Amino acid sequence: MDSKKQRELLHLLEEDSRMSAEQIGKMLALPTEAVEQAIAALEEEKVIVKYPALINWDRVEDHPYVNAMIDVKVTPKRDVGFDEVAERICRFPEVKAVYLMSGASYDLSVVLEGKTMREVSTFVSQKLATLDSVVSTATHFILKRYKHDGIELEDRDEDRRMVVTP
Amino acid sequence: MSAQLSVKSRLSSTVASLKPSGIRRFFDLAASMEGVISLGVGEPDFVTPWRMREASISSLERGHTAYTSNAGMLELRVEIQKYLEERFSVSYHPESEILVTVGASEAIDIALRAILDTGDEVLVVEPCYVSYEPVIRLAGGVPVFLKTTMENNFKLTPDELEKHVTPRTKAIIFCYPNNPTGGTMTADEWKTLLPIIEKHDLLVISDEIYAELTYGRMHDSIAALPGMKDRTILISGFSKAFAMTGWRLGYVCATPDLLAGMLKIHQYTMLCAPTMAQMAALEALRHGRSDMEQMIESYRQRRNFVVDGFREIGLSCHEPDGAFYAFPSIAATGLSSSEFAEKLLMEEKVAVVPGEVFGESGNGHIRCSYATSLEQLKKALDRMERLLGKLS
């Protein structure tokens, strides 16, 4: 499979990970087996990491949760730089994402999820801020998610076309 | 009683004799039903990319609300010139050979009106867009239809062309990549027609509105072939490639004498194309390429899927190399395309356009637009299969 088709395949799965190999094969003019092999190889190489669903938790009742983004300033360590502390932060299950940032007054951006604001702030003050390399933290609570991973959560795009046109 | 003309005679005889569009009746039927899956839409299913919408909004905020020059903003014509040269190797001068129109539809109208005298014949390659025949008649011309068939992949052959030329033939009009068939023509195929076009000194009106939507091979413009620029009126626009149908923005390119004629009609009837649409078009040509490429990739995937699907449910379907239509044959059912389309709508709630709307040689086929979501395409195929089961 050429790299262009491989990219197309990845885009299709990114859009709908439940799309069958048979259907992908039809769309890319490839045999089903070739698609299956390519997907297996991409999984093996960890290009495809996981097949999660994008859930709008705001619409789920009785599911209290809050998200926060924490700016974390750290002291990098000789030889391992930021990696050691970043990996340490990753291990907490409350942590949803960790990014190393450029151009900011902090180093790591950490996305946290908790049931309540108190839970999040307790985590920050007791677990995160107390790590050796962490110099300071600033917590920003997320009020509403409008778009996530390229997808608008409250999709207002409807088909406004007439039913039949020449 | 006041002396009043009857309703019929208040219209000109030309207008009174025009047939209403065959698509209209179908639209009324489909629009009155709930839960219809439509493969009958002749436009992209993408909303105009935000980049273009934003450019237009911003131009309004800055107060660009006045007329532009009759031929359209020079900046836009310069971009059109660069674009056509880069993409299709045709070269038109932005100041004397390019005119920005209100959609390709206006371009078709003014091109025909600029060249036709009463009784002049125009060869129309069928199946074709529904407006060619009425617009030719409105311009006083006489349409003469050339047939193409599935066996030929809906390509125009030299025999078919030669057979219909008469001393009154002034021009030929066609659309490749084709609506409704998805057929295309290669440079080599064009070359087989050139001797006949030259021998009979025909003008060529080439509607290239689907030029960007080809799969596997770049579009070949007939205007790019040696000697053809002088006799070709090239028509295109932004609707299909950039998903900008509602903006109504197109353009026409021709040698200065022809263009001056068209400009006369345009300046008296239209003055200029809408300024805010021209602003969006400028953005499309300058920065819209990647948006366009993404849309084309998605059409290609859906084309592959749907053509496969038709064949699996037993409809023969040629490989459409362009546009976003498949044109499968339903001849095996023994029904006319209108009968089939009506049954499909009434019994299975799938709207397609019967091929005969696009001319006699479209009969036996249905036009299915695959510019709709995969989910809808899958459901439509299932429902068609069910109907075919009932019919067999």
Image: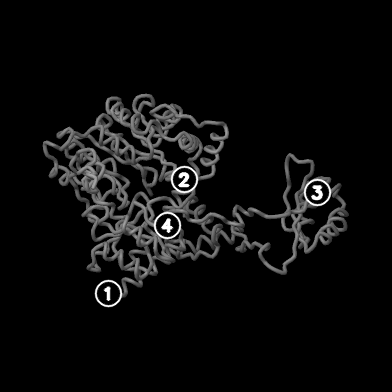
Q: CA distance from mark 3 to mark 1?
A: 69 Å
- The structure residue drawn at horizontal position 41% and vertical position 32%, both measured from the top left corner, is B80
Looking at the image, residue B130 sits to the left or right of residue A64; the answer is left
Residue A155, by quadrant, is bottom right
Here the colouring is one colour
* Residue, disc 1: B392
Q: How many marks?
A: 4
- Asked if marks 2 and 3 fall on the same chain, the answer is no
Camera-side residue: A73 or B246?
B246
The percent coordinates of residue B7 (x first, y second) are 24, 48
Label 1, residues with CA under 10 Å away: few <14, some 14-19, many ≥20: few
* Residue, disc 2: B293
Q: CA distance from mark 1 to mark 2?
A: 41 Å
Chain letter of disc 1? B
Of circles 3 and 1, the one toward us is: 1
Can I make out residue B279 in this image? yes
Q: CA distance from mark 4 to mark 3?
A: 46 Å
Looking at the image, residue B246 sits to the left or right of residue B6; the answer is right
Instruction: Please identify the quadrant where the C terminus of chain B is shown.
Output: bottom left
Chain letter of disc 2? B
* Residue, disc 3: A72
